[in-house]
């Protein structure tokens, strides 16, 4: 494993673990939901089973120092055949208490954004984070924490196979898309994650603090709604 990045090593270990436990082979998400044919004669596990397995692994995870102060892990939740995955940077205090993503004031605000463009975490949307444990004091996740946790999200995206991703905030967008620009620039760029279009916007917490960001967020949501992959 010499010369490999830490995230690539974790990725390989996850793949081996999945294979040994479930016989599940991860694949890159396809470009279109039309190519959903599964040719594995060994009846691979359902998305629900894979997500439950990931949540179990996350619950016992000690890969980075964030496990020390968490009350609950927050693996993510939502539809198992989503049109869109929403990705933030990490759980806050409300999420740490409940074990659910985006449930505080910012989460309720996010739910209103999604409803405005026909999305809902109960029917066609999945919500997750780059790191699954709360960074103390809501600080940004450190690079080593993001690298340690990212393979969980990668596996979730691989099994959920969304048509599009909505990245909320600079950290989530930078890590997911391997960019370094600020969110003001990122939201005007055409981004993708492994062939899946990514729309970047501000984090709902930032918009609650600065209402001038409401108009740009609405533009971003309309951009998301207009993506050809969501209109097919
Ligand atoms: S943040 Fe992720 S990698 Fe770190 S302990 Fe929690 S689940 Fe594990």
Image (spheres, rainbow, N blue to C red):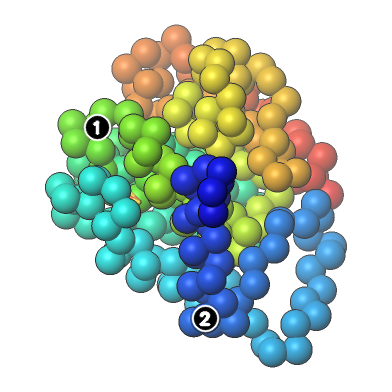
Residue at the spot x=37%, y=13% of the render?
210
The image quadrant that residue 211 belongs to is top left
1 or 2: mark nearer the eye: 2
Indicate the quadrant containing the N terminus: top left, top right, bottom left or bottom right.
Answer: bottom right
State whether residue 48 appears in this view.
no
Which residue does the numbered mark 2 point to in the structure image? 20
Mark 2 residue element: helix
Q: Secondary structure at mark 1?
A: helix
- Residue drawn at the location 62% of the way across and 48% of the way down: 84
**In terms of depth relative to the viewer, which is nearer, 214 or 187?**
187
Snapshot quadrant of residue 230: top right
Residue 6, labelled with which disc? none
Is 14 in front, or is 184? 14
Q: Position of residue 38 (x, y in %)?
A: 77, 76
As drawn, the residue found furthest toward the front would be 2
Residue linked to disc 1: 138
């Amino acid at each position: 494993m010499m010369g490999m990045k830490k995230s690539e090593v974790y990725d390989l270990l996850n793949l081996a673990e999945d294979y040994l436990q479930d016989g599940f082979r991860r694949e890159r998400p396809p470009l279109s939901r039309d190519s959903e044919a599964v040719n594995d004669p060994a009846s691979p596990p359902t998305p629900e089973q894979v997500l439950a397995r990931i949540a179990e692994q996350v619950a016992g995870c000690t890969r980075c120092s964030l496990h020390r102060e968490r009350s609950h892990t927050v693996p993510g939740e939502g539809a198992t055949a989503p049109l869109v995955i929403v990705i933030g940077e990490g759980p806050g205090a409300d999420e740490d208490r409940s074990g659910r993503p985006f449930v505080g004031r910012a989460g309720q605000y996010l739910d209103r954004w999604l409803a405005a463009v026909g999305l809902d975490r109960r029917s066609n949307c999945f919500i997750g984070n780059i790191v699954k444990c709360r960074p103390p004091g809501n600080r940004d996740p450190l690079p080593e924490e993001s690298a340690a946790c990212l393979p969980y999200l990668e596996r979730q995206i691989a099994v959920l196979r969304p048509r599009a991703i909505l990245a909320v905030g600079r950290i989530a967008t930078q890590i997911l898309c391997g960019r370094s620009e600020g969110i003001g620039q990122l939201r005007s760029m055409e981004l993708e994650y492994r062939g899946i279009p990514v729309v970047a916007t501000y984090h709902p917490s930032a918009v609650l603090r600065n209402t001038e960001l409401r108009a740009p967020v609405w533009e971003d949501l309309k951009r998301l709604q207009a993506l050809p992959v969501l209109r097919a």
